[in-house]
């Protein structure tokens, strides 16, 4: 990708050398495949507009990125982890055990999760969370709460009006932050909407067990975990014209020549409906900074400051043009980065 040089006089980015000796002069970033394109855009612009080297940005998924982030402190560990969910308490405990005690949480904006299929494929145009629960659940309770293997094999089995084609869904793998949002905002909500969760609990399950059952995905091949990024999901859709994939809004908007998107709960996904909260399947996006590396790895704080500047992450910046929904509290995020405010 190519960028014109940004007018960054107001960004307070300086090219001074970091204090202290170091043998690595590039910021290293890894994590969420959803945050990856935004981080890559910022990294390239940072390299073009400052005297610091272009940061190295890798993918791998939120969980994998945070695992690397928590390995310890030092030039052989990454400086920033990108995530499409908040860091978990268990991950912070691992971080602390390995000496990563001061972490700066940076929320960059919001993204939506969309459900898309081939442009020329079946008419997947309207979904409800209940459709996805009934299509994806490993087991579904009967009227008496007795659990049985999911009998639905076509989308028409799930609900009249859906295409009469076999269920073939390509969903984010368990190492992706997107999977957690998919489970909680689609599968669990759908489970509740159908009354399945109520039947499970009436039959004797406690709430935690019922939630786990609601979010347990079938393993008979009709639901396929995608451990790579959205390009792998797109490739699966390309080779399966009856498939439906789960994507980030920004990825979909950059592939509208290949994909068509369905509404969820009667609402079409867009930056406007996500910003308003009307679209039901959205989530904040983050990156996490290892404070111990600030002042040691050249350009680390400057890169973080650059990332959340109005010129990049604001509603008129290149990240919004790519699909990021700008954070209405961006000024507070900018202040947290400037002050190096760590998580409690």
Image: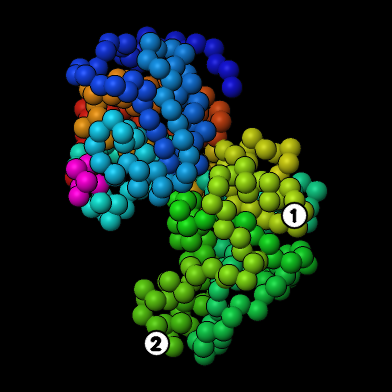
Rendering coords of residue 284 (x, y %) = 42, 44
Q: Give the residue at mark 1.
A: 240
Q: Residue furthest right?
A: 120
Task: Using residue 200 as the reference point, say whether residue 87 is left or right of it.
Answer: left
Q: Which mark is residue 204?
A: 2
Rendering coords of residue 336 (x, y %) = 26, 31
Q: What scheme was used to colour the molecule?
A: rainbow
Q: Residue furthest bottom?
A: 144
Badge 1: residue crowd in 10 Å (few <14, some 14–19, many ≥20): some
Q: Quadrant of residue 154?
A: bottom right
Residues drawn in magenta: 95-100
Q: Quadrant of residue 230?
A: top right
Judge whether 116 appears above or below 306 on screen: below
Q: Quadrant of residue 151?
A: bottom right
Q: Is residue 128 visible?
A: no
- Mark 1–mark 2 contact, CB under 8 Å? no
Residue 153 located within the stretch drawn in magenta:
no
Q: Quadrant of the C terminus?
A: top left
- Give the Cα distance between marks 1 and 2: 40 Å
SS for dot 1: loop
What residue is at 61 percent from the left and 64 percent from the top?
223
SS for dot 2: loop
**Of the image marks 1 and 2, the number of the one nearer the N terminus:** 2
Q: Is residue 75 visible?
A: yes
Judge whether 273 appears above or below 302 on screen: below
What residue is at 39 percent from the left and 43 percent from the top?
65
* Nearer to us: label 1 or label 2: 1
């Amino acid at each position: 990708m190519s960028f014109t040089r940004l007018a960054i006089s107001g960004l307070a980015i300086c090219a001074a050398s970091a204090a202290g000796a170091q043998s690595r002069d590039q910021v290293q970033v890894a994590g969420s495949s959803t945050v990856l394109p935004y981080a890559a855009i910022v990294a390239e612009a940072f390299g073009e507009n400052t005297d610091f080297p272009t940061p190295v940005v890798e993918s791998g998924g939120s969980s994998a990125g945070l695992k690397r982030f928590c390995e310890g402190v030092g030039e052989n560990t990454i400086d920033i982890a990108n995530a499409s969910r908040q860091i978990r308490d268990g991950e912070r405990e691992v971080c602390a055990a390995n000496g990563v005690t001061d972490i700066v949480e940076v929320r960059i904006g919001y993204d939506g999760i969309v459900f898309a299929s081939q442009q020329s494929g079946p008419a997947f145009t309207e979904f409800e969370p209940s459709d996805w629960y009934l299509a994806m659940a490993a087991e579904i309770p009967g009227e008496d709460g007795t659990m049985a293997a999911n009998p639905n094999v076509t989308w028409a089995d799930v609900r009249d009006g859906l295409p009469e084609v076999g269920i073939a869904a390509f969903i984010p793998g368990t190492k992706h932050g997107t999977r957690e949002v998919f489970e909680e905002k689609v599968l669990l909500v759908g489970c509740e909407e159908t009354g399945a969760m109520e039947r499970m609990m009436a039959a004797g399950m406690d709430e935690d067990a019922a939630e786990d059952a609601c979010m347990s995905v079938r393993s008979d091949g009709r639901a396929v975990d995608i451990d790579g990024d959205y390009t792998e999901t797109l490739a699966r859709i390309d080779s399966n014209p009856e498939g439906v994939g789960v994507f980030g809004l920004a990825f979909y908007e950059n592939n509208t020549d290949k994909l068509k998107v369905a509404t969820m709960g009667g609402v079409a996904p867009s930056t406007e409906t996500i910003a308003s909260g009307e679209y039901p399947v959205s989530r904040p996006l983050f990156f996490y900074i290892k404070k111990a590396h600030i002042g040691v790895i050249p350009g680390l704080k400057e890169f973080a400051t650059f990332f959340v500047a109005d010129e990049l992450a604001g509603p008129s910046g290149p990240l919004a043009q790519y699909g990021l929904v700008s954070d209405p509290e961006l000024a507070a995020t900018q202040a947290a980065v400037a002050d190096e405010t760590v998580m409690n």
